[in-house]
């Protein structure tokens, strides 16, 4: 169980099995994410030799823009259903077996690669 200022919230299994929020549902958030990736990629001179790691990567809403620029990514998403959505998005985008571009659910043995 997790507890905090609002009291007990429940077990990890309960919280991270059917998480309700998908970041890609917000067009304005996707626009902001795309703009951010453009800015930070330039500012930090990110390229194919870089690695962007995002914890709680949701459905890949942010990492997809790094991938489009050819920048390797690793997304870690604890919510099972959201990680599955990221896997499906990766498959639609042309999944590969690339070792440096993946989204994974740390609560399972499965790892998914995205192109």
Image: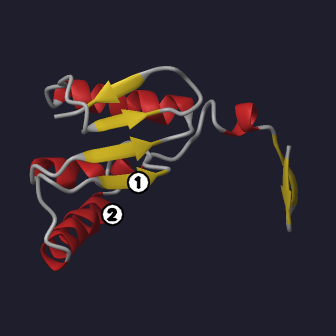
Residue at image position (27%, 69%) is: 32
Measured in 3D between alpha carbons, the distance from the residue under mark 2 to the one under mark 1, in whole angstroms, is 16 Å
Q: How many labels, in total?
A: 2
Residue at image position (16%, 65%) is: 46
Of residues 89 and 39, the one nearer the viewer is: 39
Of residues 25 and 106, the one nearer the viewer is: 106
Residue at image position (50%, 50%) is: 56
Check disc 1: other Cα within 10 Å, few if <14, some if 14-19, many if 20+: some
Task: Please state which of the two labelled residues, at mark 2 or mark 1, is closer to the viewer.
Answer: 1
Q: Are marks 2 and 1 in contact (CB under 8 Å)?
A: no
Residue at image position (27%, 32%) is: 89
> Where, by quadrant of the figure, is residue 59 drawn?
top left
Which residue is the site of mark 1? 54
Q: Residue 104 carries which label?
A: none
Of residues 102 and 12, the one nearer the viewer is: 102
Q: Which mark is residue 29?
A: 2
Query: In the image, is residue 48 above or below residue 16?
Result: below
Left or right of residue 67, residue 52 in this image: right
Query: In the image, is residue 53 above or below residue 88?
Result: below
| Label 2 vs 1, first from the N-terminus | 2
User: Quick one: SS at disc 1?
Assistant: strand
> Where, by quadrant of the figure, is residue 75 drawn?
top left
- Image coordinates of residue 54 in percent, x first then y, are 40, 54
């Amino acid at each position: 169980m997790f507890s905090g200022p609002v009291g007990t919230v429940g077990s990890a299994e309960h919280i991270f099995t059917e998480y309700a929020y998908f970041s890609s549902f917000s067009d304005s958030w996707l626009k902001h994410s795309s703009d951010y990736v453009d800015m930070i990629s330039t500012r930090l001179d990110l390229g194919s030799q870089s690695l962007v790691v995002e914890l709680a990567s949701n459905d890949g809403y942010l990492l997809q823009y790094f991938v489009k620029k050819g920048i390797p990514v690793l997304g870690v998403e604890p919510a099972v259903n959201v990680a599955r959505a990221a896997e499906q998005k990766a498959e639609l985008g042309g999944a590969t077996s690339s070792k440096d571009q993946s989204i994974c659910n740390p609560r399972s043995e499965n790892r998914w690669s995205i192109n």
